Image (cartoon, grey):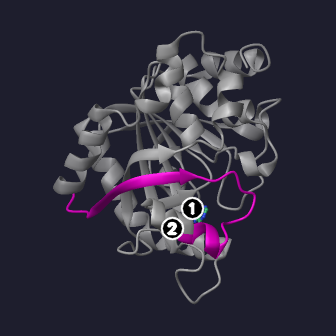
Amino acid sequence: MELKYKDLVSTIQNEAPFKPELAIILGSGLGNLADHLTKVKSISTADLPGYPKSTVKGHKGFIHFVKYEGKKLLLFQGRIHFYEGYNISDCLLPVHIIHKLYCFNTIITNAAGGVNLSFKPGDLMLINSFYAFNIKKELLEVLNLPTLDQRNSFLNFPSKKLSELIKTASLEANIYLQEGSYWFGKGPSYETPAEIKMMLKFGIDAVGMSTAHEAVYAQSLGMEVGGISLITNYAAGLSSTKLSHKEVIDTANEAQNRFESLIKKAIILL
Ligand code: HPA
C-alpha cells in the first residue's frame, strides 16, 4: 500500500491546506453533508492518477478539506467497496490518506439494512461492535501486522471517546440514536432472507458492506474510530417490499437532515 499509493498520497499531502482534526467517511447517500459545508479545498479523486473509481450511485468521489465552527475536517464523499471488485488494500486507501495527513480521529458512516426488529428505515445507529470474521483472513494478510496487540485491533472498536461524543451529540441535537452491532457482508449482492434469519438468531442489529475493514485498519494505525449506520431499509425478508439500491438512496435522502444535525453537533463538541 505504501509504495503503490506513494505518489497519490504525496499529491494530497502537498495540496492539504491544514492538518485535519477529524475525518469522516460518508456512506451511501450520506455525501450531501459535504455539499452543505464550506470547503477550503476539494480534490476530485478522478484527478488523482491511480485512485480507484467508485462505481456506485450516491458516491461522488471527492476529498474535501472543510472548516466548520473552527474545526478542521477531512470529508470523503464516496468510498471504495470490496464488492466493486477492488481488493481490500484499495478499499483501505481513504484510511491510509487520513493517517498520512496525521489525522487521528475518524468517524465512519454507512447505509445499512436493519436486522433488529425494533429498527425502522431512517433510524441512526451507533455501531458498538462488528462481525468481520468473513474478511479477517484477507484483511490480516494485507495489514501484515507484526504484533499481537496490532492484530487484536479487531477487538478495540469503537473508540470510547468518539462513541461518547456521538452519544452526547445525539442528546444535545435531540436526535434519537439506536445502538447495535454491524455485520460486514462482502457482497456483491444483498443478503438472502435465510441469511437475515440467521443474523436475527445471532442477535445482529444491522448489515452492510463496508466499515469493518476500514475501522480495523484505522485502529491498527493508532486512530480513534467511531461508526454510525443509517438504517436505510428492513433487511431482506423482513418486509414485503423488494430491497433495492434506490430504496437505500431514497431513505438516505429523507434522513439527511437528521444525519447532518448529528454530525454537525459532534463536530462542534469535538
Ligand atoms: N444489506 C447490505 N448492505 C446494505 C443494505 C442491506 O440491507 N442496505 C444498505 N446497505
Would you name the residue on which mark 2 appears?
252
Q: Quadrant of residue 211?
A: top right
| Residue 196 point in image, percent of width and height | 57, 69
Where's residue 265, x and y in %?
A: 27, 48
How many numbered marks are there? 2
The residue nearer to you, when weighing 157 against 41, is 157
- Point 78% across, 50% down: residue: 84
**Which residue is located at x 17 percent, y 54 percent?**
172
Q: Position of residue 142 (x, y in %)?
A: 71, 24
Front one among 207 and 58: 207
Count residues near mark 2 (Cα–Cα under 10 Å), then give few for <14, some for 14-19, many for 20+.
many
Q: Are marks 1 and 2 in contact (CB under 8 Å)?
A: yes
Residue bearing the label numbered 1:
29
Q: Position of residue 76 (x, y in %)?
A: 57, 41
Q: Name the amino acid type tagged 1.
A: Gly
Residue 190 inside the magenta-drawn segment: yes
Q: Relative to residue 168, is residue 141 depicted above or below?
A: above
The stretch in magenta equals: 173-197
Quadrant housing the C terminus: top left
* Secondary element at tag 1: loop
